Amino acid sequence: MTEIRDCPRELLALAVGMREDWDRDRMWAAIHAAHAAGWPFLKTVREIVRLAAIEDSTSNDLRIIAGETRLPGPAEHTPEEVADLKAQALAAAADATERLRQQGRARVTGEQPVLRDNDRGDGTAA
């Protein structure tokens, strides 16, 4: 069997195609809410098809259900793992900025101030 790809735009077209009374923008927001809640794509597909078969369901129902059934996230990371993940993200952002700068699509403005967790924004600690 070939791998099933996530295709939210096509799912949106299917959902509003099945139910013309469903609002396209609300369904798009609901699909995003399900994704943000950690739902696998196929769970979202199954839930949309199930809701489409219910006569009085609305395009907002999926968003409500997704908000009530948030799946557990990944296990917590140690502080060292968090620091490593942040360093990787910072390096990736710096690389992307440099590539854009070389292409003339980004302007590097130099060092920027960094707010600390307890910084009030005026340079003094809370």
Image (cartoon, helix red, strand yellow):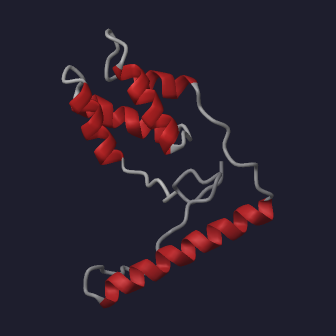
Direction left: furthest residue: 20
Q: Residue at x 25, y 27 (%)?
A: 18
Picture coordinates of residue 28, whole percent (x, y): 31, 37
Of 62 and 96, the residue lying toward us: 62
Residue 110: % across, % down: 42, 81
Q: Residue furthest top?
A: 56
Front residue of this view, candidates 67 and 40: 40
Residue 94 placement (x, y as % from top left): 48, 79
The image position of residue 123, as x and y in percent, is: 57, 60
Looking at this rendering, what residue extends furthest in the bottom direction?
102
Residue at position x 61%, y 56% in the image: 124
Please indicate whether residue 14 sits to the left or right of residue 39 in the image.
left
**In the figure, 100 relative to 25: above or below?**
below
Residue 103, quarter of the rendered image: bottom left
Q: Which residue appears farthest toward the front when viewing the image? A: 1
Residue placed at 71% from the left, 61% from the top?
Answer: 82
When the figure is inspected, residue 121 is found, relative to residue 109, above or below; the finding is above
Number of numbered markers: 0
